[in-house]
Amino acid sequence: MSAAFDHLKGLLEKQKTLSKEDIDQAIKAHGELSADELTWIESEKHRLEREGQETVTMEQYLAALKVLDTVEEGSDEFKKADALVQKYESGT
């Protein structure tokens, strides 16, 4: 593994994310990454981002649907429930 890869891997473990600038600086300071190394860094970065996101359970989704049916559209409660429904239905 390259020095840039080792540096970025350590930075990713520490920060749980990497910016494009982080990657560019590491490449400038430590040399190029191989295609496999860059693929691993990007996939690990994506995995950590997904793990950090809150997931909506089926129970939360069903409860939010009930709220949408019972409260006034445009209210804060409606907006929160709608956001949960949208998040669940989008799969994110």
Image (spheres, rainbow, N blue to C red):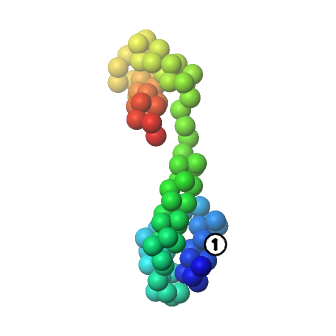
Please state which of residues 86 and 80 is positioned toward the viewer in this rendering: 86
Q: Quadrant of residue 71?
A: top left
Query: Residue at (45%, 18%) from the top-left corner?
Result: 65
Q: Quadrant of residue 7?
A: bottom right
Assign a secondary structure to mark 1.
helix
Instruction: Indicate whether 36 appears above or below 50.
Output: below
Q: How many numbered marks are there? A: 1
Amino acid beneath label 1: Gly
From the image, tell me which residue sits under label 1: 10
Residue occupying the far left of the picture: 74
| Other-residue count near label 1 (Cα within 10 Å), few / some / many at <14 / 14–19 / ≥20 | few
Examine the rendering and report whether any part of residue 25 can be seen. Answer: no
Query: Residue at (41%, 13%) from the top-left corner?
Result: 69
Examine the rendering and report whether any part of residue 1 can be seen. Answer: yes
Query: Residue at (53%, 49%) from the top-left corner?
Result: 50
Residue 72, how many percent across, how many down?
A: 38, 16
Residue 15, how many percent across, how many down?
A: 60, 65
Instruction: Indicate whether 69 appears above or below 1.
Output: above
Residue occupying the far top of the picture: 70
Query: Residue at (57%, 55%) from the top-left corner?
Result: 48
Q: Quadrant of residue 70?
A: top left
The quarter of the image holding the N terminus is bottom right
